[in-house]
Amino acid sequence: MEDTTLEAKRPERKIQELSDQLISQIAAGEVVERPASVVKELVENAIDAGADSVEVRIEGGGIKRIVVSDNGCGIPKDQLALAVKRHATSKVSNLDELESVSSLGFRGEALASIASVSDMKVISRVAGEDAFSIADGEISAASGNKGTRIEVADLFYKTPARRKFLKSEGTEAAHCQTVIERIALAYPEVAFLFVANGKPIINLPASSIEERLTRLMPRDFRDAHRALDAKAPALRLYGWVCLPTAARSRADCQYFYVNGRFVRDKVLSHGVRMAYQDVLHGSSQPSYCLFLQMDPHKVDVNVHPTKSEVRMRDSQAVHQFIFHAVEEALARTTIVDPSSGEIMDTALPSSPRDVSAQAPAEAPAAAPSVNPSQFKYAQPKPSRANTEAYLDFSSPRPKSFQNSFPTTIAAMKVDQASLSTTNITSKPAVEVPKGLQPLGRAVGQVCGTFIIAENSAGMVLVDMHAAHERILYERLKKSFDERKMPMQDMLIPLVFTVTTEQMATFEDAREELEQLGLELSAVGPNQLSLRSVPQLMINQISQAGPTIVREVLDDFREYGKSTAMMEKRNEVLSRMACHAAVRVNRILTIEEMDAILRQMEQTDRADECNHGRPTWVQLTAKELDSFFMRGK
């Protein structure tokens, strides 16, 4: 019987040095995954060469043919042979340049890897000289414009096994288009032309970043986004984030760039996702196009063959900076221009805002500072209506209310009889001029649910329960953040097991865990004991304490911070706000409706309720006319 064991199949072979061709083909397996990988490498080389116009033509999804032409500086004749060799580059020459690389390419592997799995021809001309080409190692005279033209034919014909893993021509062409769009967003000063099978797909002239964004981002993003521009020492984040109402079901519209390079990084994306946690509905995915500028010495781009991942020296600081910058941008309530009725705050500020106060190397700091005149009037202190007396923690308490902090939902419930007779029309602490009332004046109520208001643009419809719920929720969070969290000892400490990594994280993050209100101690090599927890969360901890603690430890290990406790706390506060908000079918007076509108204008994130749904919509006079076919 034939021996089929591994030992019988493994031949005895001597260790030997691999050939240059095989080395290049192995390297190509890392760099060249599909036609889109070739397009990416060649377009990035064109931009590094200083081109302001790049043309990409493909046939058969890029499998049959790829041609990338640019008007960059070109390659001199005496350097053409070096250009197609492995580990030959003009972009770095020593370790210091590698550690501070700012070019898109630097490995010197792209052309050699592409040539090892295809038929490749390079034609290049330097200004003031003749054009030359190189193919199969032979240099010859050629004709061509200033710049470089690279032709790649029959991709993977030298490695047929790799070709089997490619998708249909249409799918591969779509991947090529996506790569070009990603690069084009970061380089609006460069014109791009993409042609597939003779049909122009992308034709982007050089433009401003705003125009490029308008051309490439989905319509729902263009119609509902916020601009942000924040800075801290050695950091700047600018770009656009979508409003929660324009979120998508898939994460297919998320663009993050570090020093002009598109990257996929879980720390960066988690920072953005955290900023949306209070306003995003369900499993919806935010859309954004963000650019992070930082000291090249503090980010390592040499961690992945395709350069799509980065490693930052102080990832926690960057994570916190991104979180606060995006959160602040989302917190601003949309403003309607009283004169034109158009939504304001959709263009980049003229200068970046300084958010250096929140360098996360220290304790968590406040959100980025903003010049209120750029977006809305200054935030007044919230009014203290009787309806929210239960929620105003700064007001005096009766003797029976010994804690300065409510600890259960029951303690926060508004008595329904009191709610029905409460006057919620107390004037705001700061009177707002009528000209600065974006939501206008209330004129009535419909279906027991919606406030009808009139502003200079037309008609505003407000979901009164959702709007009031957001107002109370934001006030609750602010009140809790300003006070020390009361603790409660567990009657019987919870003892549970954790992994070795989680135990190591616990040892490193003891102080941070105590700040979150978790008093933990090690009672075994892989066992922890939970002895004290925040009083507000005693019920949640009793039901799922070990799971929550493990989640917190995992977050600390991966991101250097955890929002799990804050999320659980906010769940409780959200329910409190929901119970206390005005109910559907309650008839309000005009004064009460106006009070809700003014409070909305003074509340962060008032555009969405606690569940991510919109709280108000604008119907313009033109839209109202169209309902009745006026002017036709």
Image: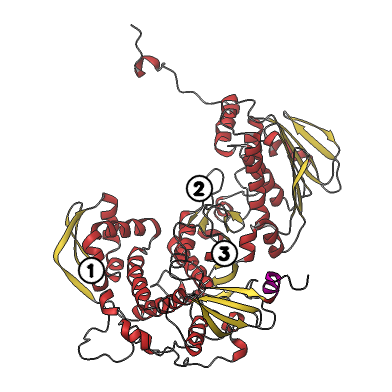
Q: Is residue 208 magenta?
A: no
Does residue 310 appear in this view? yes
Q: Position of residue 483 (x, y in %)?
A: 32, 81
Q: Nearer the viewer, residue 25 or 169?
A: 169
Image depth: mark 1 or mark 2 in front:
1
Q: Nearer the viewer, residue 610 or 41?
A: 610
Which quarter of the picture shows residue 362? bottom left
Q: Position of residue 433 (x, y in %)?
A: 58, 92
Residue hosting label 2: 303
Tell me which amino acid carries mark 1: Ile
Residue hosting label 1: 538
Q: Is residue 228 left or right of residue 599?
A: right
Does the residue at mark 3 contact the one at mark 2 (Cβ under 8 Å)? no
Q: Is residue 132 left or right of residue 181?
A: right
Q: Position of residue 482 (x, y in %)?
A: 35, 81
Quarter of the image for the N terminus: give it: top left
Q: Give the magenta range.
A: 622-628
Spatial separation of the CA atoms under disc 3 and disc 1:
36 Å
Q: Which of the numbered marks, if any, corresponds to residue 242?
A: 3
Q: Residues within 10 Å of mark 1 (few under 14, many from 20)?
A: some
Q: Secondary structure at mark 3?
A: strand
Q: Residue at x 74, y 73 (%)?
A: 630
Quarter of the image for the C terminus: give it: bottom right
| Labels 3 and 1: the sequence-earlier one | 3
Q: Is residue 624 magenta?
A: yes
Q: Residue at x 38, y 61 (%)?
A: 560
Does the residue at mark 1 contact the one at mark 2 (Cβ under 8 Å)? no
Tell me which amino acid carries mark 3: Cys
